[in-house]
Image (cartoon, grey):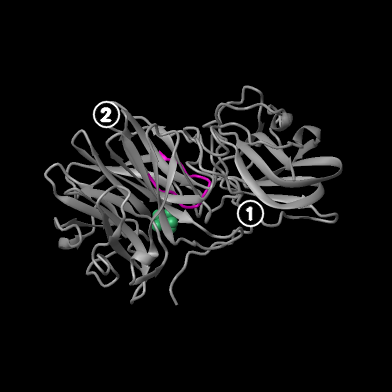
Amino acid sequence: MRRRWVTTLAAALLLVLATTGPASAAAPITTAIYTADPAALVVGDTLYLYTGHDEAPAGGTNFVMRDWHVFTSTDATTFTDQGAKLSLSAFPWAGADAWAGEVEPHNGKYYWYVPVNGNGAGWMDIGVAVGDTPLGPFTDAKGGPLISDSTPGSSPLNIDPTVFTDDDGQVYMYWGSYYGLRAAKLNSDMISINGSVITPSGVTNFWEAPWMFKRNGTYYLAYAANDSGCAASGYACVRYATASNPLGPWTQRGVVLDQVSSTTNHPAIIEFNGQWYMVYHNAGAPGGGNFRRSVTLDKLYWNADGTMQKVVQTTGSGGGQPPAGTNLASSATASTSFVSSWETLGAIKDGFVPTSSADHSHGAYGNWNHQGTEWIEYQWPSARNIDRVATYWFDDDLGIDLPASCQVQYWNGSAYVNVPGQSACGVAGNTYNVTTFTAVSTTRLRMNITSKSGFSTGVLEWMAFQA
Ligand code: FUB
């Protein structure tokens, strides 16, 4: 039986269909569908985002991905969904798992490299489609996999191709997962590899999702890493490495994007209209989760020495603004398992809109120097009907850090139990992490907060919404 990505995510609310419309710079590019695994390309005055399409049902515990969409923008703010421009049906030799791809222009054509679950031996393969314009139409360019498990030297999981053309016209492809990064030169036909598959050196902590580009003569490779130095268990951050040769050796330079509210993390880094962007996905859209992700983007800035500054995630409910709805927090009494004597538990329900996770100008809840799991709770004199919370975490860059995980519970009359159908309990900084669940009628709602090893946790604002 083929391996599958499995988690224990519970059900989330049904997706509320919305039309694609203007999205603020850091909001999801759309909330009409769930999108993931962005690749970015600039052609003329247009930014193209090629994305996966998450179709898992609420509460689904696996990816359901059947096609890829293209989004266009001329200002990196408002995106138009051009529709599903490629689907599994374009590859008769494949049957499932339309995962993370990338489009590369070559000789007036556009080649879309995608990982798919082939019908043959092994699991994931890399196929390639071709079209005459950035919007296609795209057709299978090869009639079979470019890379499969039977390709000598290939990755333990052949997914997530990133394709890069150097100034001399030579094209390179990097790909892989399960700690198995691989690279190869492509022939100018774009559908065959030139020479052997290599295992590049120096890309430490590589997990998956490579993204290659060049700036000022230096090669950059950003990628998802899931080591404990940058992400909670089960989550990933984005690290990057640099090299002076397109096939390495590489030198790891650090983290450019912290973990996001989805377990997976996937970078595309691009310059558009003189501004650099980090395009990525998270679980921030309404009803979102690990298998219902949303592509978003934030500005990326460079240091003078060619290193990248860590991207400030301004995403979540949309531009750092509190989610809409009736917030029941102000009428609740707050309590906690522990609060530091100098902190202010009441700050979590004062309605203040923080400018960042470090903004405790209106007070903060913090439990330094406790580690492990602590809780905060709201209590009402009579039952309230509640179906979601929004949490803005406190991170003072000292002893208090973003949590490793969290869990919403309610009092069912005799015990605290997990809320049913909880979507991902997001732990992203600088944003409202919205967690949805099947509505509960209760007098007490609790948030269990588990710290990263060596840190305590804190909350700037905790909202509980009437169903
Ligand atoms: O979307 C399916 C897989 O999850 C991608 O191929 C990985 O990069 C991760 O985002």
**Quadrant location of the N terminus in the rendered image:** bottom left
Note whether ligand 1 is within 8 Å of mark 2. Answer: no
Rendered view: 233 above or below 61: above
Residue farthest toward the right in the current orientation of the protein: 381
Could you say which disc has been placed on residue 305 in the image? Answer: 2
Picture residue at 19% right of the left edge, 49% below the top: 106
Where residue 129 sits, quadrant-wise, is bottom left
> Which residue is most to the left?
168
* Residue 94 appears in view: yes
Q: Nearer the viewer, mark 2 or mark 1?
A: 1
Give coordinates of residue 119: x percent, y percent.
36, 74
Instruction: Give the extent of the magenta segment.
Output: 256-267
The circle on residue 14 is: 1
Q: Quadrant of residue 84?
A: bottom left
Q: Is residue 451 magenta?
A: no
Q: Residue at (56%, 32%) from the top-left corner?
A: 320
142 up-or-down from 394: above or below: below
Q: Residue at x 68, y 43 (%)?
A: 389
Q: Is residue 230 visible?
A: no
Above or below for 6 versus 393 = below
Structural crowding at the residue carrying mark 2, measured as other residues with C-alpha within 10 Å and reported as few (<14), some (14–19) or many (≥20): few
